[in-house]
Amino acid sequence: MNFLTVEGLSKTYDTKILFENISFSINKGQKVALVAKNGAGKTSLMKIIMGKEIPDTGTISIRKEITTAFLEQDPELDNSKSILENVFIGNSPIINAISNYEKCLIEQEHTHTEESMKRLEKAHEEMTVLDAWDYELKIKQILSHLNIHDLEQSVNTLSGGQKKRVALSKVLILEPDFLILDEPTNHLDIEMIEWLEEFLSTKNMTLLIVTHDRYFLDRICNQIIELDKGTLFPYNGNYSLYVEKKAHREMTEASELEKTKNTYRRELEWVRRMPKARTTKSKSRVDAFNVIEEKVKGKQTEDKLKLEVKMTRIGGKILEMIKVNKAFGEIPIIKNFTYEFKRGEKIGIIGKNGIGKTTFLNMILQLEKPDSGKIQSGETIVYGYYAQTGMLLNEDKRVIEIVKDIGEFIPMADGSKLSASQLLLRFQFAPETQYAYVSKLSGGEKRRLYLMTILITNPNFLILDEPTNDLDILTLSILEEFLMNYPGCVIIVSHDRFFMDKLVDELFIFEGDGIVKSFPGNYSDYRLSLEKKNENRNVKPDANLKTESINHKTENVTTEQGNKKKKPSFKEKHEFETLEKEIEKLEAEKKELESKLYTSASDHLEINKISERIENVIMMIDKKSMRWLELSEIVS
């Protein structure tokens, strides 16, 4: 069943073409991610689909009989109402029944009149008819998972992140047939994101998602749609398969472009030598030349984002925190914390929202003072602080003016100097964008400009508080590469597990009540250690092992039984040997297929056929390898 159909859609913003004549559809059960660079038009496309913006051309069709909900990147709530009232705004019969029941309940608690009791009884009956009692429980569970507890709190007292979570809970509670989410993981801590992954993967909902969270994409989505230079490219599979297939596509395009360039050179020479008297034959060749010229000029490879800046020399002493304590009133943030930072360390900080992570960073930067203890920075340390709130950029200034306020010429790592305009080009700000007003930039472009203003101050100690919010996947990948090779120290607070796994070699875990523990490893290592601890806790002691005398006898019996169980059958031995040969053959086939991809020219059908076969071969290798490992424990 088709839920959404987009045909011939085009949209231009000022003079910039976001997308042109794009078409795609989403069917029931599909979980689709929309991927694109910042400023490419992801949010505009989502708003057009939901009727909040008008396209220049094209049509949008959503099946009428299905329910649809949309989470905007910056959702609008009614600031005059409470959290609960905002959640219950809508035309759903169940939501209206629950909302009415809650109001009648509050009225009865305050008035205790006969009329209020009758209204409550009627509301109670309506709840029973609509089977809404479990629904109410589900609402409170979802709100609780998103750390929303005081349902009577006014929305105008909430932070931006809290408002986003209220808006998210509102669309999740509805459990629509078709759910559209724009950056749903922003402002969620890691625990919330993992809960949301579980929720969306178990519900029978059709999804269209914009997110930069690569683990989230990998675990939720079964199709990726990439918006690149105004054109859509669909990929079946999750994020991992998308990366692989995109690499194959770009490799093919590069090969085609090189061939086209060679043809262009030859045709250009002919056109220059062309006789004045144009025959029909020569005119057709000129027309063909014009087509080739258009292709070459239209497919020029663009410069990639380059994060190259000079780092201030770093001395022997970096940063030392000695018995640091901090509390807000009776709520402890950090207790008796001691740590000496070393050169080149990359430390990740994790913990629930509101637990004190940003306060910890502010103390390092001397923006807040500890209640007791010492924080000593080395004399050569220059901090670069990427704040979660972002930079308060002057919206009325042009982009190039923001950079020139810092310096007309910026020193690079190789000793050279770049002008403000040259540096902006390296950060993927085209000439026309450089002279645009900051107010015209997308959220991600503003974040990229903010990151640039920090890096060009030449820091040797970077402190990044939620740097991944609103940055596109390409920018994130390049930022990761830059940080991996960055010789200075880095502290990262992030809910992006992929980002943390790739970069950090130690974690500070904020557990609450002022407890901060260090863990050697990245986030996935930490989760694995927690799972092992939980497994050990869940192992129940054997009732036969209560006394030492029974212990010895039982140990002998258990060992004999274990040996009997582990002894491989003839069938298992044969399967083990066969699997080794099969895996070898599949590995050889995989290499051969990959080689064919590089040698294939411009045959798109052949490329797709080979790519699909590679996917199947990889899946078979993984499956057979797992079985081989199981059998190896028995056979050995």
Image: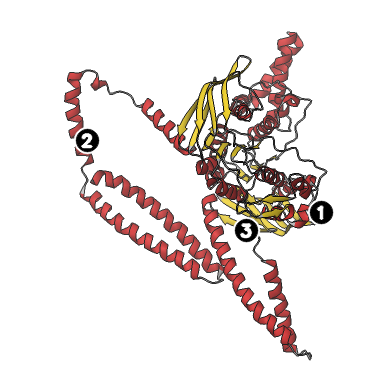
For label 2, the residue is 562
Pointer 3 or 1: first along the chain: 1
Residue that mark 1 sits on = 14
Q: Which residue is mark 3?
A: 233
**Quick one: label 3, few (<14), some, or many (20+) residues within 10 Å?**
some
10 Å crowding of disc 2: few (<14), some (14-19), many (20+): few
Q: At 73% across and 87% down in the image, what residue appears?
A: 274
- 219 is higher (above) or lower (below) than 613: above
Q: Amino acid at mark 1?
A: Asp
Q: Amino acid at mark 2?
A: Gly
Tell me the CA gap for discs 3 and 2. Answer: 54 Å
* Left or right of 528 in this view: 256: right
Q: Is residue 113 left or right of residue 28?
A: right
Q: Nearer the viewer, residue 458 or 232?
A: 458
Q: Is residue 511 visible?
A: no
Please name the amino acid that badge 3 sits on. Answer: Phe
Q: Earlier in the sequence, mark 3 or mark 2?
A: 3
Q: Nearer the viewer, residue 20 or 204?
A: 20
Q: Secondary structure at mark 2?
A: helix
Residue 93 position by quadrant = top right
